[in-house]
């Protein structure tokens, strides 16, 4: 059996850190009386690109999990994947709030 079902958090964490920093830098632009629209746009593009990578990695992870399932497990997988994704989204720490206990 391949070890494709293991989710490598070490790949996503640096991307999330960069995304968070870009997000903060973007909103720090509000401190200025005038906004550098070119910089604001560049930061938004970086935020979007980082989020895209995170979503691609997550999708590929779940795809690899499904690939090792038998037909009964695949049916169950298909019936719960959206619920799992929603729970993951709801469980993400909010800015300036502590992470939930796991």
Image (cartoon, rainbow, N blue to C red):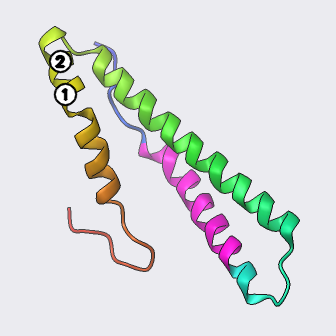
Q: Position of residue 49 (x, y in %)?
A: 66, 46
Of 68 and 59, nearer the camera is: 59
Specify whether residue 19 is in view.
yes
Give the image location of residue 82, x and y in percent.
Answer: 28, 37
Q: Which of 7 and 21 is in front in this view?
A: 21
Give the residues in magenta. 9-27
Residue drawn at x 63%, y 73% is: 24
Q: In the rendered view, does 20 fall on the left or right side of 80? A: right
Is 90 situated above or below 33? above
What residue sits 85% from the left and 84% below the top? 34
Above or below for 20 versus 79: below
In the image: residue 83, left or right of residue 13: left
Q: Is residue 24 magenta?
A: yes
- Outermost residue, top side: 71
Q: What numbered label is drawn on residue 30?
A: none
Quarter of the image for residue 78 reads top left
Tags 2 and 1 touching, CB below 8 Å: yes
Quadrant in which the N terminus is drawn: top left
Q: Position of residue 43 (x, y in %)?
A: 74, 61
- Assess whether residue 17 is covered by the magenta stretch: yes
| Residue density around tag 1, few if under 14, some if 14–19, many if 20 or more, within 10 Å | few
Which residue is at the far left?
72
Location of mark 1 (residue): 79
Classify residue 53 as left or right of residue 76. right
Nearer the observer, 62 or 34: 34
Residue at label 2?
A: 75
- Label 2 Cα neighbours within 10 Å, binned few <14 / some 14-19 / many ≥20: few
- Residue visible at 29% across and 48% down in the picture: 86
Is the residue 87 above or below the residue 59 in the image?
Answer: below
- Whole-angstrom CA distance, mark 2 to mark 1, is 6 Å
């Amino acid at each position: 059996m391949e070890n494709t079902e293991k989710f490598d958090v070490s790949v996503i964490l640096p991307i999330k850190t960069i995304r968070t920093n870009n997000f903060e830098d973007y909103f720090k632009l509000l401190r200025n009386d005038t906004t550098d629209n070119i910089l604001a746009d560049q930061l938004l593009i970086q935020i979007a690109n980082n989020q895209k990578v995170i979503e691609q990695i997550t999708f590929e992870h779940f795809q690899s999990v499904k690939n090792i399932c038998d037909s009964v497990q695949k049916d169950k997988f298909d019936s719960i994947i959206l619920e799992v994704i929603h729970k993951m989204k709801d469980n993400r720490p909010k800015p300036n709030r502590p992470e939930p206990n796991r």
